[in-house]
Image (cartoon, rainbow, N blue to C red):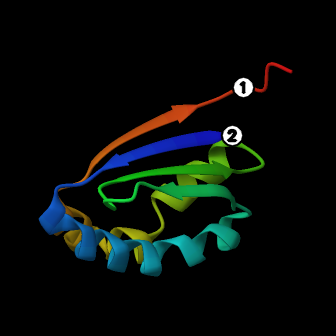
C-alpha cells in the first residue's frame, strides 16, 4: 500500500484538484486502486491510500506520459508531497 501526504498552500488548492481529476482516473490503467482519500476541512491537506499489485505497476503509473503531461498543474499548486510504501502489520 502507498500512503501519499499532500500539503497545499491556499492558492494551490484549485490547481491541485484539477490535477487530481486528470490523474486519478489513470490508476486503473496500471491496476492501481484508490483505497482511501481524505481531505482536511481547509482543503490544504490530503491523504491518499493507493494500492498496486507490484512496485513496477506503481512506477508505470508515476511515469505514465498522460500523468506527466499534467505536471504543470502540480507545479502551479506548489504541492509538497510525501510518498511512503507501507506494509500491513496485522
Q: Counting residues from the N terminus, which is met first, the one under dot 2 or under dot 1?
A: 2
Please provide percent x and percent y for residue 82. 38, 38
Q: Quadrant of the N terminus?
A: top right
Residue at figure coordinates x 78%, y 26% from the top left: 88
Residues 63 and 50: in front is: 50
Q: Secondary structure at mark 1?
A: loop
Q: Are marks 2 and 1 in contact (CB under 8 Å)?
A: yes
Q: Residue 73: x percent and y percent?
A: 23, 73
Q: Is residue 52 above or below residue 76?
A: above
Which quadrant is home to the C terminus? top right
Which image quarter: residue 37?
Answer: bottom right
Residue under label 2, please give it: 1
Q: Residues within 10 Å of mark 1 (few under 14, many from 20)?
A: few
- Secondary structure of the residue carrying tag 2 is loop
Identified at 45% across, 38% down, the residue is 83
Q: Quadrant of residue 27?
A: bottom right
**Residue at which label 1 appears:** 87
- Residue 79 place in picture, x, y as percent: 24, 54
Q: How many other residues sit within 10 Å of disc 2, few (<14), some (14-19) or many (≥20)?
A: some
Above or below: residue 7 compared with residue 68: above
Name the side, left or right, on which 55 lies relative to 41. right
28 and 66: which is toward the camera: 28
Point out residue 71 in the picture as x, y percentages from the top left corner. Answer: 27, 68
Q: What numbered label is drawn on residue 68? A: none
Amino acid at each position: 500500500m502507498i500512503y501519499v501526504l499532500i500539503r497545499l498552500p491556499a492558492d494551490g488548492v484549485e490547481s491541485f484538484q484539477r490535477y487530481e481529476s486528470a490523474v486519478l482516473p489513470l490508476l486503473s490503467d496500471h491496476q492501481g486502486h484508490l483505497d482511501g482519500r481524505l481531505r482536511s476541512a481547509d482543503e490544504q491537506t490530503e491523504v491518499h491510500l493507493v494500492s498496486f499489485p507490484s512496485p513496477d505497476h506503481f512506477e508505470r503509473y508515476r511515469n505514465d506520459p498522460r500523468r506527466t503531461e499534467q505536471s504543470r498543474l502540480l507545479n502551479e499548486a506548489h504541492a509538497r508531497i510525501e510518498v511512503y510504501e507501507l506494509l500491513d502489520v496485522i
